[in-house]
Amino acid sequence: MSNNKEKLFTEFTAPTTQEWLDKIEVDLKGADFQKRLVWRTNEGFNVQPFYRREDLKDLKAVDSLPGEFPFVRGNKKDNNLWFVRQDIQVDDAKVANAKALDILNKGVDSLGFKIPGKDISKEFVATLLEGILPQYVELNFKTCQCHCVELAQILVDYFKEKNYPLADLKGSINFDPISKVLSKGKDVSPVLECAKPLIEALAELPGYKCINVNSVALNNAGAYIYQELGYALAWGAEYLNLLTEAGVDATEAAKRIKFNMGVSENYFMEIAKFRAARLLWAQIVKQYEPKCDCACQMHVCAITSEYNQTLFDSYVNLLRSQTETMSAAIANVDSIVVTPFDKPYEVPTEFAERIARNQQLLLKEEAHFDKLVDASGGSYTIEHLTDAIAKEGWKLFLEVESAGGFLAEALKGNIVNAVNASNDKRHAAAATRREFILGTNQFPNFTEISGGKTPLAASCAACHEPGELPALNTERLASEFEALRLSTEKAAKQPIAFMLTIGNLAMRQARAQFSCNFLAAAGYKVMDNLGFKTVEEGVDAALEANADIVVICSSDDEYAEYAIPAYQYLNGRAMFVVAGAPACMEDLKAAGIENFIHVKSNQLGTLKEYNAKLGI
């Protein structure tokens, strides 16, 4: 075998960036490059359709290595193992213990226990952890903030009594009073005094995190990616300041902090978010002059989002959470919780929890995502996104710091108001289909019914008594469409929308497909057709089908010929709708035609209006 190392493709000349742009300009046939191919993100920066090595020449983080400061490429050097975590609501210690032992045999290696504060006791914890070996399993606990120190003391005593190797145990206690300020609208900041005693109580468990940043709450309230990133950094910095001012060593304080972050469906952006988060957090901690670089590592548990989950077509939630899990795994997080697909409308079933576990196990055991460190490293696009998101997140972090810090801004209501404003913008974008929700406002399942499913209650700022702080609005993105469709289901008769297709074949088919998807989002029964020779034939067929809505589907030019005769022949016997926004719209309106649906329509508002006209 020859020892010569030949470089592949040396006979090809690499095209320059300008040559690529020239070729694209030809392919676009005069269309605007900026409008057609450049994506303006919610984060405030543009994403180009392609990137090249030259775009990364000024990015310093590209030269870093996995497991080394500033940890943009991950905390580990030789693998990408993460904990497969499942959370358990503990109402009965014995029942929860049985469930924990069961799922540990099904691939889970990280448990999350949510325990009511009133139940915290030595006996309760002993029953809950019976038969669980903490040296092999990550254990995470969440309880009333006032009981965290007590729980920590009980855990340390329990582990010592069992002679477990304390230095090897890994886990966390979710102490985060600031999250209550945001999610409940209650000022519980006095509880922050428990932070230092909590760290002291866990002194013999160096592998336990106890100061948490639960920015997943922002994600589930519709925050944009840069908002979750920037606020999470400011949140963590607030805890670092509080701890060091209370006399906790900076190295110890940083090592006790854990980030529980959400992950949404924006695949590449989420990968970049976690990479940027590690990069920026390392820089923040470095300013406290820790004794070792390992204190600068960010430890993240990623939880797939609830905000974009849907009640209708709920199995699509599996697609959403799968890509979200992939983003988190590729981004080298420490643990992942996959939200079961049925979470929007019921306490997750055993089946849904099993699927959620298996979504992670497939990525590990079949796709081998745990084998390669920083698989996205070197990708021109992801490296650029990491840098761009880092800049926007850092800008927001500095704004919060200059305003007095995260806690001060939270107590003023500024954090909640900013996130709720983003939630409102996203709901408005969904209403006009500028933000797609597959199976809800885009390509709904035409024949699906709720089957008795109703949304579980979401917390909203409006639910709190006057005088309290504003609270995060966690109303899911699809909630208004779901309420509309559920109201349609309750109607005495399911409205029928009939497509009166006529004229140009390509245009009538395209507009009929658009109209069916548009109207089916409200739960209407849609009836497409192959085409009619005359409008009279089409109207007669619609009335024979007992249609409540007749949608004429044709080309813009032909609407001038067909629309008014069809409207007049229908003579008010059903609602008449024109699919499109033709140049002759004003003439059609003058003839009495009121209803038009097109790509710029407010879908949600239009469907609410139609329901009102139909008496629903």
Image (cartoon, helix red, strand yellow):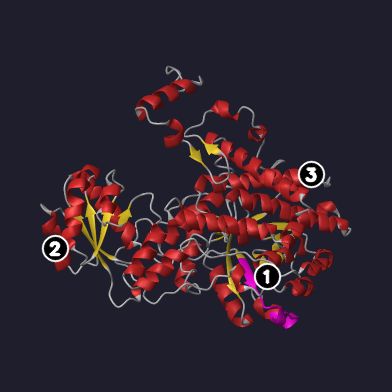
Residue in the picture at 53% in, 43% down: 41
Q: Is residue 148 above or below residue 6?
A: below
How dense is the environment of label 3, judged by Cα within 10 Å: few (below 14), some, or many (20 and up)? many
Residue in the picture at 21% in, 52% down: 563
- Say which element carries label 3: helix
Query: For this rendering, which residue is in front, 576 or 310?
Result: 576
Amino acid type assigned to the residue bearing label 3 in the image: Lys
The residue under label 2 is: 541
Q: Is residue 538 left or right of residue 385?
A: left
Q: Is residue 456 above or below residue 220?
A: below
- Say which element carries label 1: strand
Give the mark toward the camera: 2 or 3.
Answer: 2
Screen quadrant of the C terminus = bottom left
Residue 123 part of the magenta segment: yes
The residue under label 3 is: 286
CB under 8 Å between callouts 2 and 3?
no
Give the mark toward the camera: 2 or 1.
Answer: 2
Q: Quadrant of residue 170?
A: bottom right
Q: Position of residue 441 (x, y in %)?
A: 39, 58
Residue in the picture at 78% in, 75% down: 150
The residue under label 1 is: 142
Amino acid type assigned to the residue bearing label 2 in the image: Ala
Read off the magenta span: 111-124
Q: Position of residue 475 (x, y in %)?
A: 53, 65
CA distance for labels 2 and 3: 74 Å
